[in-house]
């Protein structure tokens, strides 16, 4: 019973300390950007027709594409336990080859360069 009370006390005290620190720490140095309703760097009272960088969206889409690749490859360790692991590795190789060729194409076209 004593061990359970000790673990419970440590858990509660650590939770309270972390909650207090997370509540008070961000309020130490308020910034004009942090106090604005939008933290995206754009003026919320200005024109809504500001031009956006298409390169930013291209890199964001590429990030999502390769993030999806990781999600597709997560079941791979369990795929070798199937009846035909060769088929699983064939599909994985096809997906990785397709994504690598796409990345090489984007790189060759200059889509990954920020500066013009």
Image (tube, grey):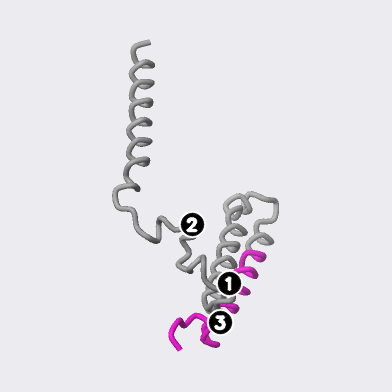
Q: Main secondary structure of the magenta part?
A: helix
Image vertical order of residue 87 relative to residue 104, above or below: above
Mark 3 highlights which residue?
106
Given the current orientation, which residue lies at the most extreme top position?
Answer: 1
Q: Secondary structure at mark 1?
A: loop
Q: Nearer the viewer, residue 18 or 41?
A: 41
Image side of residue 40 versus residue 91, left or right: left
Residue depicted at x 41% and y 55%:
35
What secondary structure is marked by label 3?
A: helix
* Residue underneath mark 1: 48
Which of the marked residues, 3 or 2, is nearer the chain's N terminus? Answer: 2
Mark 2 or mark 1: whose residue is earlier in sequence: 2
- The image quadrant that residue 89 belongs to is bottom right
> How far apart are the two marked residues, 3 and 1, measured between alpha carbons?
30 Å
Q: Over which residues does the magenta segment extend?
A: 90-116
How far across and down, in percent of the image, does residue 94 sit? 65, 70
Q: What is the C-alpha distance between the residues marked 3 and 2?
A: 36 Å
């Amino acid at each position: 019973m004593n061990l359970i009370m000790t673990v419970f006390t440590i858990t509660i005290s650590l939770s309270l300390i972390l909650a207090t620190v997370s509540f008070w720490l961000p309020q130490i140095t308020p910034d004009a950007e942090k106090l604005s309703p939008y933290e995206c760097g754009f003026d919320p009272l200005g024109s809504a027709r500001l031009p956006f960088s298409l390169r930013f969206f291209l890199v964001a889409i590429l990030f999502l594409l390769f993030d999806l690749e990781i999600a597709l490859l997560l079941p791979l360790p369990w795929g070798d336990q199937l009846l035909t692991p060769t088929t699983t590795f064939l599909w994985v190789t096809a997906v990785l080859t397709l994504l690598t060729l796409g990345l090489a194409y984007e790189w060759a076209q200059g889509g990954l360069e920020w500066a013009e």
